[in-house]
Amino acid sequence: MTSLDFGAAARSLARAAHLRDLVVPVFASPPSRRDLHRSIRRRNGSPVVSIRLGDRPRGAVLADMIEGIVVANYLEDSKADLVRSTLWLAIDGEGEEDDASTLTLRTEVAKTTPSSSPQLNAAAAAA
């Protein structure tokens, strides 16, 4: 994974985490310790997730980024699993030509459902 890919993934994950009211950590590379693939530190209460990119598969780096968000938010059990799944979906289309529109569509579907929007319910009833 290149540093440009890392930056794009960090932006996608940050956007998805922010939309779910999660703490968005700062992503950096590499960790200060050479023997670690990832580390998390808290500086003034803000989490910093550092990940080693070199000689590692893209999936391993992305998994470390997602796990960094889970740990930064102190998530456990089913809530952690749900967030992991959601974050994987947010980066699933990464690298495709229309990546931004895919992410926007997924965001809109997640934010507005017929049962949660009186305007959509009224529009559906009128149709």
Image (cartoon, grey):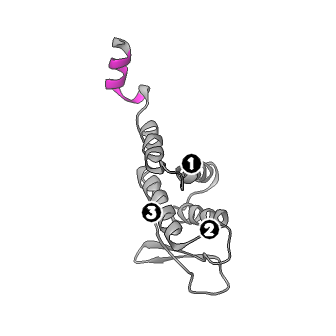
As displayed, is residue 20 above or below residue 28?
Answer: above
Please identify the dominant SS of the magenta region: helix
Tell me what residue is drawn at x 49 percent, y 58 percent: 13
Q: Mark 1: which secondary structure? A: helix
For label 1, the residue is 89
The single residue placed furthest to the top in the displayed view is 126
Tag 3 or tag 2, which sits nearer the N-term? 3
Tell me what residue is drawn at x 36 percent, y 28 percent: 117
Look at the image and say whether residue 121 sits in the magenta stretch. Answer: yes
For label 3, the residue is 24
Percent position (x, y) of residue 106? 48, 41
For label 2, the residue is 61
Tag 1 or tag 2, which sits nearer the N-term? 2
Q: Mark 2: which secondary structure? A: helix
Amino acid on which disc 2 is placed: Val
Percent position (x, y) of residue 75? 56, 57
As displayed, is residue 76 above or below residue 110?
Answer: below
Tag 1 or tag 3, which sits nearer the N-term? 3
